[in-house]
Image (tube, coloured by chain):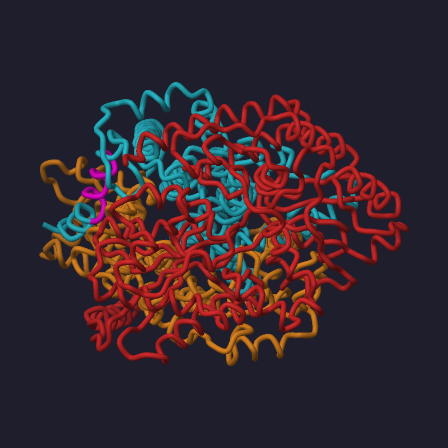
Amino acid sequence: MLVTPQLAVVLIFFYWPAAQAVLQSFLVQDAFGLSTTFVWFDNYKELLSQPDYFAAIVRTFVFSFAIALSSLSLALLLAVMADKPLRGVTLYRTLLIWPYAVAPPVAGVLWVFMLNPSLGVLSRGLSAIGIDWNPLLKGEQAALLIVLAAAWKQISYNFLFFLAGLQAIPKSVFEAAAIDGARPVRRFWTVTFPLLSPTIFFLLVVNIVYAFFETFGIIDTMTRGGPARATETMVYKVYQDGLLGGNLGGSAAQSVILMILVILLTAVEFRFVERKVTY
Amino acid sequence: MVEHEGIKRYVAHAILWIGIAIVAFPVYLAFIASTQDNAAIANGQMSLLPGGHLLQTYYQTIFVGTSGSTREPVGTMMFNSFVMAMLIAVGKIAISMISAYAIVYFRFPFRMAIFWVIFITLMLPVEVRIYPTYKIVADLNLLDSYAGLSLPLIASATATLLFRQFFMTVPDELLEASRIDGAGPLRFFWDTLLPLSRTNMAALFVILFILGWNQYLWPLLITTRDDMQTIQIGIRKMITTTDALTEWPIVMATAVLAMLPPVLVVVAMQKLFVRGLIETEK
Amino acid sequence: MAFRHFGAAAAVAVTLALASSPAHAVIEIQWWHAMTGGNNDVVIKLANDFNAAQSDYKVVPTYKGNYADTMNAGIAAFRANNAPHIMQVFEVGTATMMAATGAIKPVYKLMQETGETFDPTSYLPAISGYYSTSKGEMLSFPFNSSSAVMWVNLDALKKAAIAEIPKTWPQLFEDAKKLKAAGYDKCGFSNAWITWVNLEQLSAWHNLPLSTKANGLDGFDTVLEFNGPLQVKHLETLVELQKDKTYDYSGRTNTGEGRFTSGECPIYLTSSAFFGNVKSQAKFNFTNAPMPYYPDAQGAPQNSIIGGASLWVMGGKTPVEYKGVAKFLAFLSDTDRQVWVHKSSGYLPITKAAYAKAKQEGFYKDQPYLETPLIELTNKAPTENSRGLRLGNMVQLRDIWAEEIEQALAGKKTAKQALDAAVERGNVMLRQFEKTAVR
């Protein structure tokens, strides 16, 4: 069967370790695995009794939607612009895709160069206008910083796929709509958008998953969950408790909860949003 | 398109430039930093224009390395990154296309279940699976090998989802036509679907190559020999987060150099972004 | 066609992927470390020198990421029966390593069993004490250590007409106000590593306990105690001074150190190992001084504690391999070598002999700021409160404490509330750790 190669890889390299991770969530263990105690649902109980955990869940949802939406809309706008036969369009496209290739550790450092309260290039500009930019102590600013940095990273990715999606729409469709006399903005909503909807759906799912899972690197480099947990998301907590704190059982329990939440969210997307997608 | 041509063009150009300013500014900053003086950078006094150290810094990066006398060959690391990225990109595309094809076009039991099985892999964070995955790779004796670097990363749910979306937009008439022509499923796949997927494959290739190129945590974990390390590890090695001196210009120069192969890939793939290859007339 | 290109590339890649690993001639000793930049070069040179001096063993150093990544790599490797021989672990990971009884081989046992020369008393007590049991048995080998000092911009002091470097905290606060008035309005003084400087070092320097059981050295059932009157008053003052930026918070770690070298913060407390950066990036006259103290605290100043990392020897290796490891550790302790490491990296010499030799060679005459941390560490014989600290889940503890301090600085809690919360939350983590540390 054709799906065998992918299934094989997935089973060996994903499900087997995942099963072990789930098993881990029922254990209390030291970092080296030398002493193991089976504790049933204790790890889960402990997690769910912490109000901070619920705050993290809410925060994660808010962040993720903010990141996904801002990144998607900006990318879509740029892709539509770059889809036109303009002079130098190849240059534009390259310049817009290229930032995706910045090495993650370097990207983190660059953001420090830009927005670190006293040393950042942009911070100097901000204080010149009179804004007190201090994400070290101001939670909302730290949150904004993370959303910006995470969204930025995805713009190139989304742009690329939107462009590919737009390119796959035949010229004839656009011409037909133009002849029909529709204005450009209307054309976009009634013709382009529906035809682009499979791509949009794909990107929506991917972006939300990305926002839930891949952002811990940015948070780790920039704010480490602070100040006062203003930027602590679920996945960062997993990372913090597990890899940094050595509390593998608790971290595994959090991952299981995170996974269940995202599966539910995606299932909702598939059920309700996919109905609106035209194939 | 007959309406107000001129203004629309200007608007488009303007929006694109603003977009580029936002998106590419950090890259610009990296380039600028590689041309300036280390003290200016560390003190937050970097100017926004290129400094005068361009030639000196790049020479040092390519031929000399950081302040010590020992250095890692950048060439070897770039090579490792390249092999890994290629393996991952090609492998992922091949495997997921096949799976998506099977899921969309064939009726078999547990079809949707299998799709979800593959899809769920997106949802368990790497950090939690990392110890068990490492153990498996070690047991299979794949440490310090290209296979170990790439294999665990090859199962891509994203690519499968993308192809599924795309395949579902392909009109049934094409399938009918190909059947009438007497073509079997493999033929259909090879002659019809594959060419149609060209733009998606190109986009995916760019993304996956870059993803593979930028991997840090996994190669770090499974390589113990310096000559198997990738360029990302090399860059990280130069950024000291504890107390020693970081030579920022050289770090940035290496990062800029490390971005060149992905840029080449992007430029090469641009050729495939040509509209009108596919005329799917109803 | 693009597909042919893919096919060819894939074929090449797969062939390469099947290439095998090289053969071993000599016994290899794997050393995983987290040293970057210039320090990476020091590590490599040490290994090369050792390898050149004998032909039975080969030390192979591998960079495995920052401290946290290196430790995780070691843990993952251990779980896969693939651990290195030597692993560099940061000081805050000491408790986790200590608790892993089967996974590690204590240094004193290693040296005993292999019969290599080893004299625990030749090491500087403030340094080796951190990594030893309360009986003085060395568990890990100190490698790179530093301490917290106060970096001072002399030109700034002159500008503000301050005659001498402040010795006490009250003096520092006064001077900071003067500096602010003299033009340093964004920052009178600041520091890196918020909890290290303002809780951990502060307590040790004033002979106050951070937690019970000798700050955890004597047992995992330690309980946090740093919310005493002195620490609370200290934080209260910082909160007050933060309001007009006489004191300005620079972050949890050391990303804000550039504020000193750029001249923005004329006084900055951070690690002594910062000197490399200062030397190359500060365009003004500078020096450093011991941390200030509160004169009304009894017994202050006591001695400072170290930061940095040590080398842990992993368990499960053969006696032959251990002999090589022991030889390497003895090699590292050699006086001349210590002096060289000290001079090249800024990290402190670990033996008394090395310190004495460097002093004798006049090393500190031109660079007195390199001796300051040593002066701090050897100021007095360490007490229960100042031998070091050993708390499980230390990374998380520091995050929790930093969070609470940040809340106080932002005016959301009083200093007392913040420190009380830090103690309470921290104790929860400690009990969690204790559960897993089965002895």
Q: Residue at x 47, y 33 (%)?
A: A65
Q: Main secondary structure of the magenta part?
A: helix
Name the quarter where the C terminus of chain A is drawn.
top left
Could you tell whether C324 is left or right of C388 in the image? left
Q: Nearer the viewer, residue B240 or B29?
A: B240
Q: Magenta stretch containing residue A18, yes or no? A: yes
Q: Looking at the colours in the rendered structure, which chain would you say is drawn in red? A: C
> Is A181 drawn above or below residue A5 in the view shown?
above
Q: Nearer the viewer, residue A64 or B277?
A: A64
The part of the image, by quadrant, that contains residue A44 is top left
Could you tell whether C221 is left or right of C379 in the image? left
Could you tell whether C112 is left or right of A111 in the image? left
Q: Looking at the colours in the rendered structure, which chain would you say is drawn in orange? A: B
Could you tell whether C119 is left or right of B160 in the image? right
Q: Colour of chain A?
A: cyan
Residue B282 visible? The answer is no
**Residue C107 image point, x, y percent:** 34, 55
> Is C84 drawn above or below residue C59 in the view shown?
above
**Residue B162 image point, x, y percent:** 31, 47
Q: Nearer the viewer, residue A140 or A61?
A: A140
Q: Give the magenta-colored segment's residue range.
A: A13-22
